Amino acid sequence: MNLDWYYMARGPLFKFAVLFFLFGMGYRLFMLLFLGWKKDYAPARGSAIVGIVKAFWHHAWPPEGLREVYKGRLLAVLSGDIFHLAAFTVILFQPAHVKIWGKILGFEWGSLPMPIVDIAAGIALISLIVMAIDHLASPVRHLTSTTMSWLNLFFVFLPLLTGWMTYHHLWLPYQTLLTFHMLAVEWILIWMPLSKMSHFLYFFVSNVIHGVKFGKMGTL
Amino acid sequence: MKTIYEELLERGMTRRDFLKMATVLTAALGLEHTMVGKVVAAMESKPRLPVIWLEFQDCAGCSESLTRSHDPYLTKLLFNDISVDYHETLFAAAGKQAEENKEKIMKEYAGKYVLVVEGSIPTKDGGVYCTVSGKTAIQQLKEAAENALAVVAIGTCGSFGGLPHAYPDPTGAVGAGSIIKDKPVVNVPGCPPMPEVITNTIAHVAILGELPELDYLGRPKAFYGNTIHDRCPRRPFYEQGKFAESWDDEGAKKGWCLYKLGCKGPTTYNACAVIKWNEGVSFPIQSNHPCIGCSEPNFWDNNHVYDPVAFPPGLGDAAGMNKAGAAFLAGGALAIGSALLASQQKKKAAKGGEKEG
Amino acid sequence: MSPATVMEDKAVKQFIKTVGGEIAAQLEACMRCGVCAEACQFYLTTGNPEYAPVWKMELLRRAYVQNFTVIGKVKTMLGLEKPISKEDIAHWTELDFHACTVCRRCSLACPMGIDVGGLISKVRAGLTAAGSTPPDLLHMKDKQLEVGSPNGATEADWIAWYDWAERERGIEIPRDVKGAETLVVFTMLELGSFRENLVYVARILNAAGVKWTVSPRARDAFNMGKVIGDKKLEKLFAERIINVAKELGVKQVLITECGHGYAALREDMPNIYGGPLPFEIIHITEMMNRLFKQGRIKLRKGVFDNGHRITFHDSCKIQRTGGLFDEPRELLQYLAPNSFVEMNPNREMTICCGGGGGVRAIKDAYDLRMGAFRLKVEQVEKAQADTVVMTCSNCRLQFMDGFKHYQLQKEAVGLVEMVAKALID
Ligand code: SF4
Ligand code: SF4
Ligand code: SF4
Ligand code: SF4
């Protein structure tokens, strides 16, 4: 392999990807903020704060009635939850990643032993495959899936796969693998503001809206 | 033409000494003991391949390294008895006399000598930044390489441009492989390379008359086939996530992994962790200093010596942070514009009805 | 422009004006995972993936993406996003009106916290703006506009009901009393089918000494504007009540056993006005509980412990999105401490009766709503209950239809009836 790609991926492309990501997410965030918000004048029966807490908590640890509902799509719910847990374990606790976060944020936290990170990456990869199966197996998911949702799965798969290969020095020289890994990450950074992968931002906004709304109604 | 064996006999060596030497050489070449026969056969049948050693933009550190070999016998053998006929630093001869000597060998052994290059070659401004007896390094190299059997580039400078190539690279320094395209070029990078690796590689080419197996950067796989990380004694700590966080913390004292202190071991292909320096005494990581990745191209520019290897260069710089903030706000500003447009659109849509959004 | 284009245009315009940060955030958050489908009675009982809540809000998503996002605009140009067509509007009219009761169970199920049901009602609004509302509902809307009640009951009919109570049951129904504390508003559904409720409510309020009144001008809490998603009409119908309440100077407006009429007044009107109403909107369930706790009505403890098992159905508008979970249960626990059992799931995860949101009024949706009711039957049977108590007349009618359809000897009763029967005078 030519090392030029290695330098490109670590240098200019990385910078571009980060700036593009921030630009795109800035666009999305401000668009959301300035699109107009209604005040709710209906008299409150319950507390919005309690609602917000419960909204996040219920969706993380569903109460009995909700669990019944989730049972119907166990594959989707579990693969989704497990994927996020595993992927964030890797993103936040892999030693190299920890250092990168530390450099960006100015403070650091402890990293996890590599075997654990390794297992987490494996789990994340498997849960992505399960999600793909679910795309085909569930009639509803099949109806709602688009080219974009398949691309999303694929593009998330890549950095995990290449990262995992890099750690194991699989088949190719370390630099080559690291280059692939960096390129995959950079592509995700670019792809994120352009696609549903920006849902991480809206997840919080949406659940806060949910909590406020149903909290005030007294539902939660 | 005389074979190596014949030349050695002429110099007064006995058959018995010769076989002993062949055994030592076999081991030094990293070959199995059963290969002694092959080495003997090669020396008995192949002619001596003289070595010409050129230096360009270098610090002579690689040659220095050579003199610290923990097998001086081999070095002596290689340089005095077998091969090196021209070396600018090590030879007593200088100036015109030396140049003539070199040209004589090149003529006499056309197509049968090995060219060793130490130091990088400047390409900017017609290559004026390094001239030897009135010729630019490029000219010197091209002339010397023309009739060479193979080129062995020693050190990261000779291989990839090395330190002179580091930003801002005022001389446009490159490695031998960037100039010589029609000859096999073996790279022996390192800043400096390990003496054993230098002698071995030269011996391999000069004695066996063939190139060792090379990796994608033209480095002998025997020495550059694994990363430092692959063979690092601290690797178990890396796996357990036990890292020294500063130079004198508990972790550093206990010999934990130096990854977080900037160790480039994971991306560095070299043999330090196995052969070690100074007669096998130690190597940087063992002495509590991270590997700086000296055998990799561009190691000086890749990122800061004490930044972890995964850091993209310039990560977290104040300038970069400002740019990041600016990008975010630029996106935001554009969004506010779009939102204003959207609200116009909403007003238009709501014309006649009341606004809801 | 052809009339067809005008039609889609109207829908899209309605969608555009409805989109704000709140809706955008929710549409963007949706991962199209389809988990919400598992909450929806219509999907669960038919297996039709098009009945997945996420799919029912698809039109709104398309309008949003195509008009508010750069990527959506690019995609539309590339043909990856299809503009909303006439066929789409017809198709989604069936999906969103026939196969959705806007029960918002899906809203609670969505892991991203999206108020799917709420967004479906926005789609309904768009469809209505495009003139594509099921004819049965349009007819009811016209009737409410013309004579005051969706079923065609006129002011004279209502007065006749009041008179009947006074004549036959000997209980006074005070009308348009200035200075009364409480304006009581029934619905035509309730009085059309359960006329005794008029008497029950009167007895409860009298027992508590509440100074109450009805008004023939503010007679029906039903609100077809809310059902079909027409804000202007919703306001018009709600104001029939609000204006009278203001004129009479009451402190509270009491909505009897009707869910969406209560929600229209309590949740929607303050937002349409942009400020709180000058009086309290209270549901009869909360009222009874309050009076009971204040000791203003006395009930016979355990009076319904008579060997029958009683269960409670949480209605979508009163319990799930009204928050009145404990109020009815406290009363039931007092009236039938030994025979009251819960169905599962209950409270905010209750399964809708299948008849709300106008579905019960659409004749063509009969099979769908009876299919959906199967879930309710399973719940009731699992709880081994003979009587199902509830606080919404629409639910109650659906239960009665359903029990008949499935030939079950079970009873659907209103909580008002039980409380009134347990009164100690
Ligand atoms: S000290 Fe360096 S080479 Fe050794 S294990 Fe740690 S990172 Fe790898
Ligand atoms: S340990 Fe690393 S930096 Fe040090 S000499 Fe070896 S390769 Fe070069
Ligand atoms: S459950 Fe929520 S995120 Fe998933 S498809 Fe339904 S609305 Fe979208
Ligand atoms: S609101 Fe109720 S009926 Fe409508 S889609 Fe959601 S769960 Fe189904």
Image: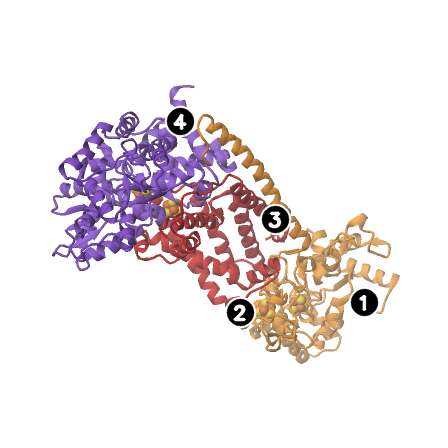
Residue C67 seen in this snapshot:
yes
Q: Answer above or below: position of A34 versus A166.
A: above
Q: Secondary structure at mark 2?
A: loop
Q: Colour of chain A?
A: red
Q: Which mark is residue A13?
A: 3
Q: Amino acid at mark 3?
A: Leu
Distance from disc 4 to disc 1, alpha carbons, whole Å, reads: 87 Å
Q: Kindly identify which residue carries mark 1.
A: B89
Q: Position of residue B209 (x, y in %)?
A: 65, 63
Q: Kindly identify which residue carries mark 2.
A: B241
Q: Which mark is residue C8?
A: 4
Q: Chain of mark 2?
A: B
Q: Amino acid at mark 4?
A: Glu
**Quadrant of res A181:** bottom right
**Quadrant of res B103:** bottom right
Which callout, 1 or 2, points to the residue nearer the camera?
2
Give the residue drawn at x 44%, y 56%.
Answer: A84
Give the residue drawn at x 33%, y 50%.
Answer: C323
Are the two marked residues, 3 and 4, in contact with CB atoms closer than 8 angstroms? no
Q: Chain of mark 1?
A: B
Q: Secondary structure at mark 1?
A: loop
Tell me the orange chain: B
Distance from disc 2 to disc 3, alpha carbons, whole Å, reads: 29 Å
Which callout, 1 or 3, points to the residue nearer the camera?
3
Q: Colour of chain C?
A: purple
Q: How crowded is the residue under tag 1: few (<14 C-alpha within 10 Å), some, or many (20+)?
A: some
Q: How crowded is the residue under tag 2: few (<14 C-alpha within 10 Å), some, or many (20+)?
A: many
Q: Chain of mark 3?
A: A
